[in-house]
Image (cartoon, rainbow, N blue to C red):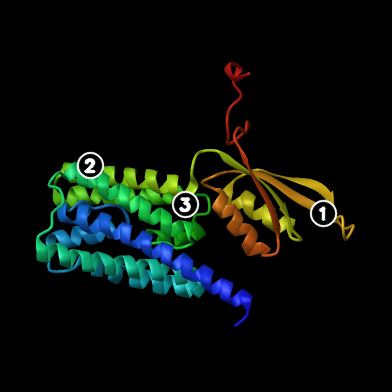
Amino acid sequence: MTALRKNNMKQLASRLAIMFVGAVIYAIGVAFFLNPHGIAPGGLTGISVMINHFFPQINTGILVLLLNVPLMIAGLIRFGKDFLVSTIWATVTSSLLIAGMEDVIAHYQLILTQDKFLSALAGGALMGVGMGMIFRRGGTTGGSDIVVKFLRQKYRHLKSGVLFIIIDSSIVTASAIVYRNIDMGLLAGVTVAVSSYVFNNILYGTDSARLTFIISDKPELITARLLEELDIGASYVNGQGAFTGADKRIIMCAAKNRTFPRVKQIVHEEDPHAFLIVSSANEIYGEGFKVYSNTEM
């Protein structure tokens, strides 16, 4: 086994281990705080919690897994195995962990808190932490993530964040209707809001931006995707390779932290050998960023 292969295997093992820890935290939030009180967060997890509320004999974790199976099969057919490797790992482990924890809770009658509002807060925060850890290592928890990827291909003008909001809002509204209790819908909304806030902070950090210089042999392809998929500006900087003497079109772009992971993904997909120089930008003025203000000058 070569040193490179050993290093790749170590990186994969580390990635899967961190995703597993994220799945444990995610499962604790669902099994110990949300499911016992019937609080339905967004995504397939929320649907599973609602089904379990009326059919408690069906384990919530198993429901999550079963509902994800057709989506994962469709994703495998449409996007290929590379997309689903991490998704399958995170989805299966989190679902089985929820199922196991739910059995333990039922056996020992473990109810950590009777306060539904505190459960919504704690459950949402733990879900956000778990999802953030999973997403930072290239995985997803399945469900809505796969649905959004399908919808994005058909409705390119809608951003992923908008689609997630639409899906989660629909499930939160459905929970209020299904339970015939507006309080349950509001609690579900609190859970979604908290999990989204925590998730974004873990995945993207603060609101500062990243200034990126991309040196690639395929600048036009990369720029076209940045403009179309992320709606961020980009400029060409003329350069010349010191060793080869060849002229280069260097891409310069500024992207908010929440968008930057996608920038890296696009560059890697178009040119795995591209050279990136990334730095933090604390203040950027112009379209999409801060507005000029006389009070700041």
Question: Which residue is labeled 1 in the image?
Answer: 248
In the rendered structure, which disc, 2 or 1, sits on the residue that comes first in sequence?
A: 2
Q: Secondary structure at mark 1?
A: strand
Q: Residues within 10 Å of mark 1 (few under 14, many from 20)?
A: some
- Residue at (40, 71) in percent of width and height: 88
Question: Which residue is labeled 2 in the image?
Answer: 186
The mark closer to the camera, 2 or 1, is 1
Q: Is residue 247 left or right of residue 105?
A: right
- The one of 123 and 43 positioned closer to us in this rendering: 123
Looking at the image, which residue sits at the far top? 295
In the rendered structure, which disc, 3 or 1, sits on the residue that comes first in sequence?
A: 3
Q: Which mark is residue 160?
A: 3
Name the amino acid type tagged 1: Lys
Q: Residues within 10 Å of mark 3 (few under 14, many from 20)?
A: some
The mark closer to the camera, 3 or 1, is 1
Q: Is residue 175 left or right of residue 56?
A: right
- Residue 63 horizontal/vertical position (percent): 24, 68
- The one of 181 and 216 positioned closer to us in this rendering: 216
Quadrant occupied by the N terminus: bottom right
Q: Residues within 10 Å of mark 2 (few under 14, many from 20)?
A: some
Name the amino acid type tagged 2: Leu
Looking at the image, which residue sits at the far right? 245
- The one of 195 and 101 positioned closer to us in this rendering: 101
How far apart marks 2 and 3 lie (CA) works out to 23 Å
Name the amino acid type tagged 3: Ser
Asked whether disc 3 touches disc 1, contact meaning CB atoms under 8 Å apart, the reply is no
Asked whether disc 2 touches disc 1, contact meaning CB atoms under 8 Å apart, the reply is no
- Residue 29 horizontal/vertical position (percent): 27, 54
- Residue at (19, 42) in percent of width and height: 117
How far apart marks 3 and 1 lie (CA) works out to 33 Å
